[in-house]
Image: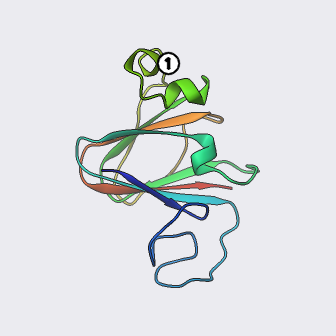
Amino acid sequence: MAQLFGAHTQGRWGQTSKGVGTPSIPVHGSWACVSGSAGEVVVYSITQIQFSSPEVGCYLQATGSVTVEYTLQNPAIATSREPGMASSTKWTAPQSLSAGAIAASDSPAWTAIRITFTEDADLMIFII
């Protein structure tokens, strides 16, 4: 099951925005890491990922093959567990991320993000 870690979520030692294995390295901006398994699809609202106002943009880095899609629709609909509501969400074309590369988000603004893991991977999201 996919897990979300970040500065405002309950993380594990070494998997928070404070750094690897250390409790007090500050990070300017919003940082989150989503860990998932091959075949998993997860959707998060912007408020689950971002806790500060963006000034520059959104950047992504994956440890494996991952695709992301974005929407500007109501995040309550996009993240709904009700199949009828969630299926009505209009998503952007998928943005493919290769392992290790840092890429800017294809979308300049979004209210929800859908992440598809094509292999076991972590996806780091940094909004600055």
- Pinpoint residue 1: horizontal percent, then vertical percent: 30, 50
Amino acid type at circle 1 is: Lys
Residue 61 or residue 10, whichever sits in front: 10
Q: Give the answer, above or below, for where 83 lies relative to 121.
A: above
Direction front: furthest residue = 82
On the rendered structure, is 66 left or right of 112?
Answer: left
- Pinpoint residue 34: horizontal percent, then vertical percent: 43, 54
Q: Name the residue under label 1.
A: 90
The residue that appears at 76% across and 50% down in the rendered structure is 53
On the rendered structure, is 28 left or right of 123?
Answer: right
The residue that appears at 62% across and 34% down in the rendered structure is 110
**Residue 30, picture quadrant:** bottom right
Residue 61 or residue 38, whichever sits in front: 38
The residue that appears at 41% across and 18% down in the rendered structure is 87
The residue that appears at 49% across and 32% down in the rendered structure is 79
- Pinpoint residue 60: horizontal percent, then vertical percent: 50, 52
- Pinpoint residue 126: horizontal percent, then vertical percent: 58, 56
Circle 1 sits in a helix, a strand or a loop, which is it?
loop
On the rendered structure, is 24 left or right of 113?
Answer: right
Residue 102 appears in the figure: no
